[in-house]
Image (spheres, coloured by chain):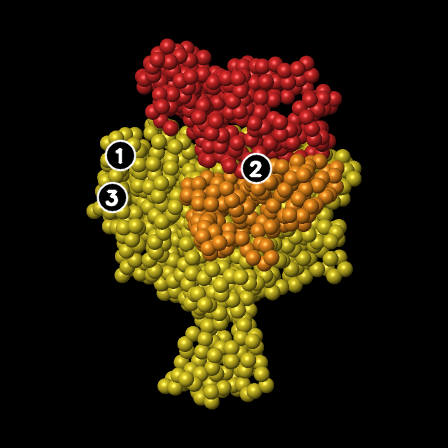
Chain colours: A red, B yellow, C orange
Amino acid sequence: MQTPAPFEYERATSVDGAIEALQRLGSEARIVAGGHSLLPMMKLRLANPKHLIDINELAELAYIREDDGEVRIGALTRHVDLQESELLARHFPLFRDAEDVIADPVVRNRGTIGGSLCQADAAEDLSSVCSAAKARVVIRGTDGERVVGMEDFHVGPFMTAVGAGEVLTEVRLPLRPGAGSAHEKVERRAGDWAIAAASAAVWMEGGVIADAGIALSAVGMTTIHLDRGEELLRGESPSDELFVQAGEIASADCSPSADGRGPVDYKRHLAGVLTQRALRRSAARALKEEA
Amino acid sequence: MAVVENLPSPTTERPIGFGRLKRKEDARFIRGQGTYLDDIELPGMVHGAILRSPYAHARIVSIDTSAALAHPNVAAVVTAKDLETLGLAWMPTISYDTQAVLAGDKVRFQGQEVAFVIATDEYSANDALSLIDVEYEPLPAVVNARKALDPDAPLIRDDKAGQRDNVASPTWEAGDEEATERAFAEADTVVSRDIIYPRCHPAPLETCGIIADFNPETGQLDIYNGNQAPHAHRTVYAHVAGLAEHMIRIRCQDIGGGFGNKVPVYPGYVCAIAGSIVAGVPVKWVENRSENLMSTGFARDYVMHGEICSKGGRITGLRVDVIADHGAFDSTAQPTKFPAGFFHIVCGSYDLEASHVKVKAVYTNKAPGGVAYRCSFRITEAVYLVERMVDALALEMEADPIDLRMRSFIAPEQFPYETTTGWTYDSGEYAETMRVAMDLAGYEDLRREQAEKRARGELMGIGVSFFTEGVGAGPRKHMDILGLAMNDGADLRVHPSGKAVVSISCQTQGQGHETTFAQIVAEELGIPPEDVEVRHGDTDKSPYGLGTYGSRSTPVSGGAVAVVSRKVRDKARLIAATMLETRPEDLAWEKGRWYVKGDPEKGAMIEEIAERAYSGDAMPAELEGGLDAQVIYDPPNLTYPYGAYIAVVDIDPDTAQVTVRRFIAVDDCGVRINPMVVDGQIHGGLAEGIGIALMELLSFDEEGNCLNSSFMDYLIPTALETPDFELGETVTPCPHHPLGAKGVGESPNVGSPPAIVNAVIDALHVTHGVDHIDMPCTPARVWAAMQGRPEPPQ
Amino acid sequence: MHVSMTVNGEQVSREVEPRLLLVHFIRETLGLKGTHWGCDTSNCGACVVLMDGRPVKSCTVLAAMCEGHEIRTVESLEVDGEMDPIQHGFHERHALQCGFCTPGMLMTTRALLDENPNPSEEEIRTAISGGICRCTGYKNIVSAVRWAAEHEAAARQEA
């Protein structure tokens, strides 16, 4: 079997301890949580950090709760817990949609939302989920905490707003009335990365879409925020024609690359189809027409 | 061997002999007590790792091993130069080519072996790989078989004197070109297709590995290895290492899947052996999954052009031209007289007037191989071609694909049937098997459902395939591998207690031999299966034979065990006659007992006969003491299992995802020793067929980089992509096999890919005009076909 | 570094390199060979063991991460010569051929039944979708889990 290069290891006993370790050990140190992105890369020798700071014991970072008009998720919350959370399913059903098709059930026992977001793989489902849900994330460093919107979180491929010596601690999802959301993904086989995926959320008021969030996975260098699509929907009544138009915007505004999963035209096509489907289900859920 | 105490005894619940007997070997596997190669540790053992080429084609300018040698845990670094001094830098292949063990002058495929590190442990061996510095001078690579034949294609095998192109072996032909020309000239309908069977990989869950343990004091070489043909390997090593065969012992214990991947002798094996001979300690080498996918024996990679014709509503002729991509070295396994394997069974299950086949093998800058993955020596390629062509013909004729097949089948009374390419099919009632499949599937209902769905814009496809294959190589006058006749031996010893040991030369990798071969002895002799130990996998303790692949275990070793059991039974008869003071011809047999005809109370059970055979009491004049026998079985012919498969697929009209909703498989493999084991083999092969049809692909870019060298990108179906298989059976005994049995292990992989592809096309033909698509039918490729732009796979 | 954990109910403590993967800790350090490995990229599931009762891919967990945790491997299923119903089910329903994926499948399905004593076919297929079997085509594995579920339910009735 392929095996990682040697490294030093520390187990963090507190979030501040992890931050201190990052500061002390410098750029050759990496945080490891679930490890299912980092460890495979280390085994293939594509990543060779000299120090690992294990944060798996920071139980204080694993929670899903309602607080101050938001659903707040600790960064160390495992995929399986996101999938099984009734609180999350009630307010943000797109999480369960996504978790049902993220990796496989065994991997979901270890991988975390913090790890997924920070890995910043453009094909990462939770990145588009959090973007569509208008999440903000809490980043803590030696200078304290700051809150960053998802639109500013993904900076580039595998690059996020989390700086050296900082740790992502929490994801905050605003609770607003009239919400409905969905995530749609096409993959070559169960557990595979998306060929394309679309996350959508709508907030309805008086039969009209007051606000919308649309984000796409796997069809760009990072998560695609479909600003033009969201603009189109605001103030409109939900309808199939509207969603078809939004799908057209999705096809046009994404920038997929050709690879083993598919060529550019197919991915653009999927972006459109899946955006439509995700919006249709979001609206139906918002109007309580669908589970 | 572990005895399972709290499981019910088979004999109280099952008949002795043939039947759905639960497996004896399960006892250790369900406890996690199997002994697979990587489980074995020997005192003083060291670990090997292989440095592999990142380039598909490059000169090796220099290799600097000094940094690796300086690593405290590294014992040695072996390169081609070191092997040259031992005469081991190149090794012979089963196809009479040579293959580099470690690359010296050039690397010829990405992943080719360049250096072998030996270290104290696996982690250190892996670390040492990154300390070896190789300077390469990249060369243009060719990975497309057609392009490899271009006059200006880079010459890959410049190591072979006189080689001026990338042709690996002379074009092989079968059938009658002129007669076929006539059939086509007289035909009502002619259809042609370019059909690719893409490169895929058997990818057993356990990768390949070896422990080589040379004892310098005794000169004995002990090898632990999961391979499918231990005796053949021993002969090869004796030849390559210059050791006497009796000084080499190969032990294959538990093997985590073979599927043809564990037939070849790999460079890693030779390196480990060389390492052990030089160092005098055991050397273990186990490949990782990337190595397995990038360098070990792949499967298929056939670029085919097929033409088929019909007259009067029946299929009359077929011709096929194939370019076979063998990779950088020709290391395919097949009987010597059949360099294209059994591809010429492409004439199929139909009473053709004529057929003609041409196969040309080429070199490319890819890993060597081609014959693997339950292929029955290229029958997977052949059946895929013919069953796709028959469907293409049906489309053109606007005929129902089943009707066309039924009208064209070889009829039962025509057996034994000599095909237009020289096969003699043994037995078959094809129409009956097809009808059983149709009933099981509810074919008419499916067609109705399809029409209704189509009206609503839903895409559903029904695909059929019918195959005849030939397995159980084979008769010694026709079939040898490297000059070794494809016969198999069996030794049967019945002990004084009446329990027995049967030693066989085939090699299970999950096929249930410890149970099924005990069942044969049980059926023939009446000794309960739990009292028959099946010995295999140890060249010191089993008779010579050519191993397990090509579904040959039941046809050849099964025949051997039946024959040897009958020899023992005949001896038992003579002893019983002496015991009962009568003549042998006055005795009749019921399972487990010889008794006096006309006085059935008077008899001798096999256990009593066994006891007598070893006792001091009088024996018949013709026999020495003991109760045993030994045979080498030379099968008179292959056996010809067949089957009718029906696939039902649904295709998402917007995303083009293909789901196999149902798969109906009706197999006729003659008499079934253990129907439970047969069913299991079929389930597994069908899952593989789904993988090949929908997602498995070894693809390469223009520079020869392998794009599917891990399980992240070489996709294998999970439980979510495979339906609840529906199996049926018909039983048409094999007239020449001692048990009436035929082989079956590969049939599901032979028959299923064309059924699935035919179903995909069936789903898309009317609405989208699709009349061909190549595998794998991934969503992207199906979508392109739906847009009218089908593309062959890379 | 030093690592301590419970493996199959027993406390174990060993000196390990930080980079030692749990699968190697189990196989090489502890000599428990029932847990297998089959890939480099966390896809095949041959290495699945239970960590605090949940299936994890031991090739993608560091031994160091298991400090203070509870690990169960296939060797823990048989207790005092009595096999677990899931083991019986695999034997009864011919849910194994080469046996290489079997320990991972046994641990995955044992955990499934612990959480969901009456799983549907779909739930079983989903639960084992993190593992690859090349031999069985999964049909008999599903059947084996149903066998075990029914036998455990019957045993609970009688109790």
Q: Mark 2 is on which residue type?
A: Ser
Name the residue at 54% across, 85% down.
Answer: B619
Q: Position of residue B793 (x, y in %)?
A: 44, 33
The numbered mark at residue B445 is 3
Dot 1: chain letter: B
Residue B454 appears in view = yes
Which residue bears the numbered disc 2?
C42
- Disc 1 and disc 3 in contact, CB within 8 angstroms: no
Badge 2 local density, few (<14 within 10 Å), some, or many (20+)? many
Same chain for mark 2 and mark 1? The answer is no
Relative to B225, is A150 above or below? above
| Residue B82: percent from left, percent from top | 72, 44
The reply, left or right, for residue B69 in relation to residue B533 is right
**Chain letter of disc 3?**
B
**Amino acid, disc 1:** Lys
Identify the residue at horizontal 51%, vertical 53% (top origin).
Answer: C85
- Tell me, yes or no, whether dots 1 and 3 are on the same chain: yes
